[in-house]
Amino acid sequence: MKALVFSAAAVLALALVPLFIQSPYALHIFILVFLAVALGESWNVIGGYAGQYSVGHSAWYGIGAYGAFILLQSKGIAPWKGVWVAVAVAVLIALVVGWITFRLRGPYFVLASIAVAEIIRLVALNWKDLTNGAEGLSVDVPPLKIGSTLITDWNSKTPYFYMGLLMALFCVAVGVAVKRSKLGYYLQAIREDQDAAHSLGIPLTLCKNAALGISAACTALAGSFAAFYFGSFIEPQAVFGIDVSIQMVLTCIIGGIGTVTGPLIGAVVLALLSEALRTSLAQAHLLVYGVLVIVVILTMPDGLVGFAVQRLRRKAAAR
Amino acid sequence: MTALLEVRSVSKYFGGVRANHEVTFSVEQGMVLGLIGPNGAGKTTLFNCITGFYPPTRGEVFFEGKRINGYPPDKVCKLGMARTWQKVRPLAKLTVLENAVVGGLLRTNSVAEAREIAFEQLRVVGLDKRAGVLAGGLPIGERKKLELARVMATKPRMILLDEVMGGLNAHESEEIIKLILDVKQRGLTQVVIEHDMKAIVRTCDRIVVLNSGEKLAEGSPKEIVNDPRVMAAYLGDSGGVKA
Amino acid sequence: MAVLIQSILGGILIGGIYALVGIGLTLIFGVMRVINFAQGDLVMVGMYVTFFLFQLLGVDPFLSVVVTMPALFLLGAVLQRSVINAVLDALPQNQILLTIGIGLVLSNLAQLAFTSDYRILSTSYSSSSVALGIIRLSTPLIYCFFITAAITVVLYWFLVKTDTGHAVRATAQDREAAQLMGVNVRNMGVLAFGLGSALAGAAGALVAPTYYIYPQVGGAFTLKAFVVVVLGGMGSIIGATLGGVLIGVAESVSAVYFGSGWKDICVYVIFLLVLLLKPSGLLGKSRM
């Protein structure tokens, strides 16, 4: 109950931010954090709850981006409608991929997920008729109107801020909902001991695919948003590259997989840290991710949140 | 009366290894069947064949009259046959209660309802006070009880217990024996793999003895305990001492 | 027809390099059960070392193998002692993530130090080729192949004929048993990672004359090495050798018939097929 009140207050505070802070750079930072939170919570459903570490989630991110872009460019469908089609395509392909790869366990699944993402990236790179290959796609976002009232023409950070906030909230809500549901329990059982889970009546492939579908959908949503936010230009390496996948995974590992707050904390820490070091590291900003993941896996494999929870438990037990 | 579980000439070969060879027996509703035999006799392999972890190479398994060869483990559990593991498998990062809830969710889509079922089973085995403890932190005796509670939460018609008393002290074993008898009273059928002969004699109506993958003997506890072939199987030579 | 033969031969030549990187990977996996996702980045380090030795001291890349290998061995040994050793009992997924982290650190440090400019190492023979009838084979690749073969033979001799080699193989087969027999398995781990890195370094030196050198070049090598190792069988050195050559040929032939864009897709599709149909690979121990 306390958590709910606290979260509601936090959301309200965030919603009021653009009224007090006008600096585009500051709003940009918030949007980066929202995006990282959305991606982290999405990955957490399949990686954290189900324990299936996909390092190929850039596939869904890119499909979300390209799907919305292609629909806008060739059919003139507005992004807020087109994104749902892109999400549906991502989910469909994810289910096929899941059906193929979920029979693999542990590290073999990781490798397969990477291979799948690479295949999709290469297809996007080579299918020039559809995606324009390495030259990328560029679109202009149409203004958002309800009836004939103009809501926004997307020329400032503020509309993106609110979209980002909504998206982050949505993904967190999905994370919470899944964790508390029957699916959530089943996924965690699969993560802890797949054979034991199987013997308790849990349909392994069905559950894993459900998790992947949900995860892919949220990731595609975030990918669409990111594509439009980052200058409305995309090319295969930027959206399908392994960097995107790695960032998603590391957000959760560093924050703490399998919890709702883990990806949240991880996203805030990583987004802020890599932004702070952007000037000194420039293109090498992933160095932060690399160093942090090594430190976290060596010293606190349950992530920052897991570490904090352990400390609290020990303190409580010592009293 | 049709048997609840019928194992008909089941064989399981792994390459050249004959883990099980033409094992046949049936389990009546409400019975406790003991499955004994020296280490390596093929008891756990038989459990795995029956519950779908791998299909028998030959032979058939019938549950409630239905042929279940090749059914995956989750389907077998849904039908009403649940098993525990020789090497306990707690869901370590989940709490005791959450472990049992996973079992309870088999028969309901409501987490709240599964919680009630789970709590009831925890109460039966005496773990209700430990509901919030992480399963990974439990000592072996409590892990075994948790596994029993978890399996009972799936509302099975029959449970297969694989050395559920392994590694327990006398007091803990006694508690398990009481639980088995209690479960029997409530009408559940059980197949129990065990090494503790005293426990077997107290709980089982009938005993099947496996040796080197084959069924060596079958009979009442009294018959089995006095069977020289059984003694020889355990001790490795003939002409042993009477039990 | 000549085109086919040329592409097959060319594929065998480059396949030798893939095999070298793969052997390093499979050695590390065999002894420590760790999947080293930084293998390609170690190749990248080897490439840069070779490049600077050439640029600053005029050392021919193929000769600089004698410097790169020990240097990378040292790097590998240090990595193993400081970081890898601590996660030998962790979840395999966490081990992979750790090595991914190492790879990120290596490639990003290279980025900071050398920028993302493509470097080119041109020797006098970089673009020359040898003619066999109507078939032309790239000279540097021929040197590559023979040096790779030599290294592989020496490695094989080491593993099969020396006591230390036996100790390494014993650790790979059964760590506990080897320990009970008096093998210092910790040192074996350092040795394996050091050797695996040295092989990556050698590969880096050997391909330096033919590839663009830049910080992110490691990624492609890592992925190809995985395909090679899974195809050949995790833990099998002969398997990695075979796998490397097969992948080299597959890549080369599909470049000719499907175009260079699709050749990588072919390789990854083969990867998925192997993972799904025969995950233990052609010669590997079935260990999922």
Image (spheres, coloured by chain):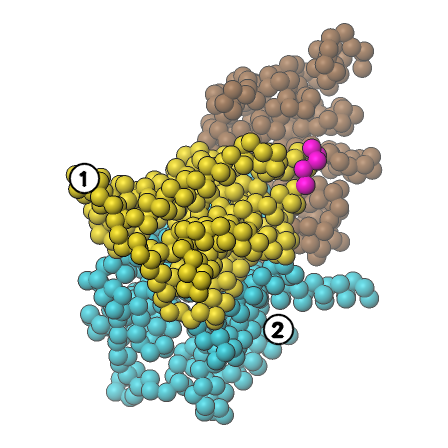
Q: Is residue C84 above or below residue A86?
A: above
Residue span colored magenta: C180-184
Circle 2: is it few (<14), some (14-19), or many (20+) Cα within 10 Å? few
Residue reaching furthest top?
Answer: B239
Chain that is cyan in the image = A
Residue beneath label 1, please? C133
Q: Are marks 1 and 2 on the same chain?
A: no
Closest to the observer, C9 or B241: C9
Q: Which residue corresponds to the image point at 33% horizontal and 60% vertical from the top-left? A: C122
Chain C color in figure: yellow
Mark 1 vs mark 2, CA separation in Å: 78 Å
Residue type, label 1 = Gly
**Picture coordinates of residue B239 (x, y %)?**
76, 7
Q: Which residue corresponds to the image point at 26% horizontal and 79% vertical from the top-left? A: A140
Residue reaching furthest front?
Answer: C58
Residue beneath label 2, please? A3
Chain that is brown in the image = B
